[in-house]
Image (cartoon, rainbow, N blue to C red):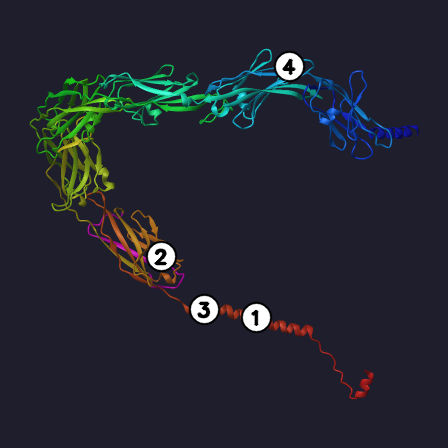
Amino acid sequence: MDTLVSAVLLGFLTFGVCSARKVSVSTGPLIRVEGQPVSIRCNVSEYEGPREQDFEWSLKRGGRPSINVISTFDSRYSDASLSARVAAGDLAVARLGDSEVELRIGEARPGDGGFYSCHTPSTDSTIQGTYKADVELIVIPDTLKVAPAPVAPVAPEGGDITLSCTVTRRLLHPTFLSVTWSLRKGSSPAELVLSLGPQGGVTTGPGYAQRYAAGGLRLAPGQDGLFSLVLTKVTAAVDQGAYVCTGRQWTYEDGVARSVVERHGEMGQVTVTPTGQSLNVSASSSSLGPVSLGETLSLLCQVGADNLDLLALGVTWLRDGRHIIAAMERDGVVLPAAVASNGSSGQGAGEVVLEHTGAGQYRLVLRGVANRDAGAYTCRVRAFIEATQGGGASGGGGGGGGRWYQAAEKISAPVTVQVAQIKPSYTLALSAARAPQATAEAMELVCHVTNIAHLPPWGLLAVTWEHTPPPGADLQSAHAIGSLDYHGNLIPGPGYADRLNSGMMSLRRVQPDTFKLHLLKTQEMDMGQYVCSVSAWIQDRQGSAGKLAEYLSTPLKVSWAPKRPSLSVVAKRLREASVGGATFEMSCSVTTKNLVEAGYSVLVQSQESIDSNVRTIMTLSPDNVLQYGGATDPNRRDSLVLIKSGPLEFSFRLAGVQLADRGFYWCDISGWTKQDAGQAWTQATSAESNKVKIDFQENGPSFAIALQADRSSVFPWETAKMECSLSVSGSSPKSDDVAYAVSWFFTRLRGSDAPSLLVAVDRYGVVRKDTRNSSSDVSVERSDSNTYQLRVHGTQDSDSGEYHCSATPWYLSASTGAWTQAQELNSAKVFLTVRFAVWESLKLPLLYGFTASLGVGLFSLALGLLCAHCCCRNTMHTPRSRNKLMDLEMD
């Protein structure tokens, strides 16, 4: 019980304390600077009474009694010593809310220091809590001084700007200093560049954070309050304007820094000079007059600028404003002309050198000047400046740390270069070092260049050989054999590519001024006139060349007495084929004239008679490749032989001659030559031999064919039989030496009149049946050596029509020993009718119907009798009374 009472009392006390009036002011001490405004806030909470509360301020200095300062409800509250200041507004109280006011001192004075008390008259029903709060105000002398150092009024683009400012104060109480640099552009408000302090922290403006991180803003340490800020790689767009230095004195209240006084110092206007204003480019030549071919030309490009040491220069030499001769990038790398111009290279000869010879000096050296080097030369300079992050760039945009942007570009005035036009001269002497006396002999022609004048030391010579056939040739116009270009590369002519590539003909440069044409084996078409054409070239810097001059030699005639090649062929019979099956053999001998190291091709041909078509049996190429002609039966290729039996003799053999082989046989032989082993064969001449005849007689057997059927009409689903009989007369061979290929044909009764194949048996016994659309089927059987039976199973109405057989006899010839095909035989036609039997088709349905009717009737009769016997009973009949009244009463 005591515990409960204690808890209740503690709760009431706690509630009472929490709800008591509380007056609070700023946490002191408050340090302010003399002459600066002061504001002290006071508020009250947890009070009763009206919402709007009143406040009174009093001041106590040292041990003296406190004096009234100002009140919110009593205008006469102020002490007489302060009345004038209150009336002037230097001392005032401002209401910030119903329960909060602020004491304001317009300009603090040394005597304003002391303890300020904030009182609140009581409006509570009971006196609880606090009704006043005190805070100490310390007024210190204004000792802050800001002394900015003036900056250079002009700075080059890409250079540095140093902003120095001295900020000091006399340390009487714990206060702190800060320095701020800002930039004002025109009439725009000043923007923060960088601020240092009050505890050494650095704050940058919105556009300077990355630049500071990249090193574009750098703080330089100083002594005696000197603070320096260095801006590197400045640009007009970002860094030009009026700079201001601001010093501030700070104190800490409740852990928060508070500025108590500040001073501004104008540092001056800074102008950033663009690189393009001071950049100048000039070009000059080391030669005052025209430059001779082959000499060295030197051109100097002089670059000047106020900030030359800050620039990275890209230099390009151009001819006529569009051809790039050489280019050097800002990092000193020299690019080839083709790369610098993206494929549009300059034209010229010799060597090109571009070098950096000094500060702002770039020398272009052209060694071995050519005609194409003449023109107007200009030097194009691009100036680059390295930008820091956030620094920006005029016209080129800013860059990240270490990035470069193009600040300016200028082109010098043109320098005209003239090249003296001197055409080289020389003479040509064409002679035959080795002249052929006959076909297939070697030939060598020499073209010598003499009396050379005005040819540059690095000039190159190229030669072209031309040949004009003699009169009477198919082509009498001059055509190129081939040429050697200024690098010595062989370029074959259209008609001489094979001979030049195989080495049978060669073009050589034996000395710088001597050229040779060599033929290992001449041909008749090589006779005629020869001319050599020598041209002088000067090579371009990119590998191409320009022609300076070209001269022709005097034509040289080359001829000899030609000897025409010829050959003759004689065929003779080696083995006679007088009967079929014998072997025929003949030889063809060749006799040649003026044909050396030749190859021969052989065609064995035949014809049945003098007026019949010529057939090619076999061929043999000059490389001994054997082929069969189109008239040769593929099954008889093993019986044919064609060989080279001697250096100039060929043998042909035909084994097992047949009647079809009779006729005339001969050889058609051609002679072929080639310049070397790797070259293709060229036909030199050809001839045919005399004809050799194969002639013998043979009488073979005679064959006949007959067809018969067992009956001419059948009923459906029955089997029809037909028999095809073959007979032999004359010189009858053995039964094993005869074979037949038999085919059965059918012509429908209704439909197409053309017979269709039913089934066929070849002479080897292989059966082949045609596709059928009927449910019936056919089969064939050989009952003996000369008889074949056809059966039609399950005949249908569609099988009605005409049937006949066809046979091709094959017999083994006793004379030739080969199977021989006889003439095809066709039998007479037989007609087969498939009848439709009416009674046969109706008797079963009638029988089934009668049986079903009889069964149903008997079943109905039996069912009626059963129902009558089991379901219907006979009862005794009782006569009704005639007395109706009595019946009614009984009812």
- Quarter of the rendering occupied by the C terminus: bottom right
Q: Which residue is mark 3?
A: 842
Q: Residues within 10 Å of mark 1 (few under 14, many from 20)?
A: few
Front of the two marks 2 and 1: 1
Q: Which residue is mark 4?
A: 169
Residue that extends furthest to the top in the rendered view of this protein: 223
What mark, if any, has residue 856 been given in the picture?
A: 1
Q: CA distance from mark 2 to mark 1?
A: 46 Å
Secondary structure state at the residue bearing disc 1: helix
- Residue situated in front as seen by the camera: 530 or 259: 259
Magenta span of residues: 710-735
Q: Which residue is mark 2?
A: 791
Q: CA distance from mark 2 to mark 4?
A: 140 Å
Q: Sequence-wise, which precedes: disc 4 or disc 1? A: 4
- Residue situated in front as seen by the camera: 644 or 791: 644
Q: Sequence-wise, which precedes: disc 3 or disc 1? A: 3
Total residue callouts: 4
Q: CA distance from mark 2 to mark 3?
A: 28 Å
Q: Amino acid at mark 2?
A: Arg
Q: Sequence-wise, which precedes: disc 2 or disc 3? A: 2
